[in-house]
Amino acid sequence: MSNLQNKKIFVIFLGITLIVSGFLVMISNYLNEKVDNAYTYMNSLLLESETEEIVEISEEVDTIDDATSSLEEEKKEEYVDPYLSYYVGSIEIPKINLNRGFVSMDSKYNDVNRNIEIVKGSTYPNVDKGNFILAAHSGNSYIAYFHNLYKLVLGDKVYVNYQNKKYTYKIVNIYEQDKTGKISIYRNSEKTCLTLVTCTRNKKDKQTVYILELEDIKDL
């Protein structure tokens, strides 16, 4: 076979390769566009099912990062929790070794400087499609019950024990907001939710909101 024929075959092969490659690129771009459109559409449907709740939150949650307290002297080996008899339920987060009680919403001890606080505007876990909102300090103080909350990620589980029931929640969203004395909670109003709020680690002007949805309820 002559060199001229070889060159012709090579040119033809190269041309076919370029045409096929171009076609594949066009198909790939088309499919990617369809996937993006589908994703955008599904997100729009999801957003339509979400509502914004705005609740007030004590600004003291945002100022305790480096706080210390004379009450820390009480926390010894034989420490007895002074609020134990007032607890109406508890929150468990095995991943960060947290197991702490909370008092009733109308108790004088429902205060972020004493306990994990049930934020005003919350509903209790047994309210269908409600939102149980808890806030606590982070930082280094002994009352910084949410100190390790930053270690949580999407999909992690949190448990709430209340009125002889164990409620299992899963984290579905985590986001930051500016500290303004209020928080905007974005959640699916068709779901029963738990919301956790604390100041953001290493960001004194931010707070982090964790949105969780109910997965299961069991008798204790």
Image (cartoon, rainbow, N blue to C red):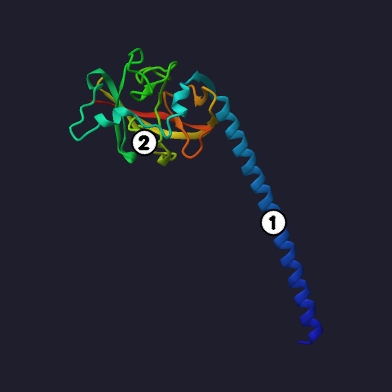
The type of residue carrying mark 2 is Lys
Residue 147 appearing in the image: yes
When the figure is inspected, residue 124 is found, relative to residue 33, above or below; the finding is: above
Residue farthest along the top direction in this orientation: 106
Residue 136 located left or right of residue 4 = left
Per the image, label 2 sits on a secondary structure element best described as strand
Tell me, yes or no, whether the two marked residues, 2 and 1, touch with CB atoms within 8 Å: no
Q: Nearer the viewer, residue 67 or 86?
A: 67
Residue 85 position, x and y percent, is: 22, 19
Q: Indicate which disc, 2 or 1, sits on the residue closer to the N terminus.
A: 1
- Look at 77% across and 68% down and name the residue there: 15
Mark 2 lies on residue:
157
Q: Nearer the viewer, residue 144 or 117?
A: 144
In space, the residues marked 2 and 1 are separated at their CA atoms by 43 Å
Mark 1 lies on residue:
25
The type of residue carrying mark 1 is Val
When the figure is inspected, residue 65 is found, relative to residue 131, above or below; the finding is: below
Q: Nearer the viewer, residue 159 or 75?
A: 75
Circle 2 crowding by C-alpha within 10 Å: few under 14, some 14–19, many from 20 = many
Task: Give the image quarter of residue 150.
Answer: top left
